[in-house]
Image (cartoon, grey):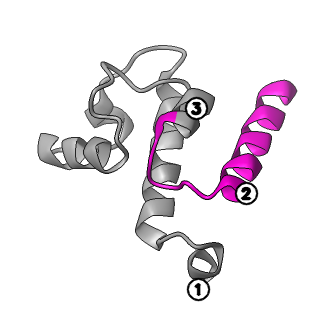
């Protein structure tokens, strides 16, 4: 229901969260995406990247860059809130 109110599908918001977690986990030290995302079938990862419009990138960008590059969630207010949360998290580390 909250996703609908925010104007985004639950699948898109969950996929974006999954990508952001993966980017956070792997941006300091490159890791195998199948380990990061707990994926067995390469087609699953490929579909996720295509849906997010990230398939042309050789590896996942850092979280803030991923947020800008992805196409799953495009609502400016939501992106600003996510950007603020990521920036705040980075400043406290």
Residue under label 2? 77
Q: Left of 80 or right of it: where is 74?
A: left
Q: Position of residue 78 (x, y in %)?
A: 68, 57
Q: Is residue 32 magenta?
A: no
State the residue position of label 1.
Answer: 1
Circles 3 and 2: CB distance less than 8 Å?
A: no
Q: Residue at x 48, y 51 (%)?
A: 16
In front: label 2 or label 1: 2
Q: Nearer the viewer, residue 86 or 6?
A: 6
Residue closest to the eye, 61 or 7 = 7
Q: Main secondary structure of the magenta part?
A: helix
Looking at the picture, how far across and down is residue 61, in whole percent?
A: 48, 24
Question: Mark 3 or mark 2: which is in front?
Answer: 2
Q: Which mark is residue 68?
A: none
- Which badge, 3 or 2, comes first in the chain's sequence? 3
Give the spatial CA distance, label 3 vs label 1: 26 Å
Judging by the rendered image, the residue that carries numbered circle 3 is 63
Point out the image quarter for the C terminus. Answer: top right
Residue beneath the point at 61% across and 58% down: 75
Mark 2 Cα shell of 10 Å, populated few (<14), some (14-19), many (≥20)? few
| Range of residues picked out in magenta | 69-92
Q: Residues within 10 Å of mark 3 (few under 14, many from 20)?
A: many
Q: Is 18 left or right of 1, judged from the image as shown?
A: left
- Specify whether residue 91 is painted magenta: yes
């Amino acid at each position: 229901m909250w996703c609908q109110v925010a104007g985004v599908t639950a699948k898109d918001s969950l996929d974006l969260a999954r990508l952001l977690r993966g980017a956070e986990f792997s941006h300091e030290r490159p890791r195998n995406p199948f380990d990061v995302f707990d994926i067995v079938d390469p087609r699953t990862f490929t579909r996720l990247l295509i849906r997010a419009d990230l398939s042309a990138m050789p590896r996942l960008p850092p979280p803030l860059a991923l947020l800008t590059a992805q196409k799953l969630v495009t609502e400016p207010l939501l992106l600003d809130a996510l950007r603020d949360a990521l920036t705040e998290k980075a400043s406290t580390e």
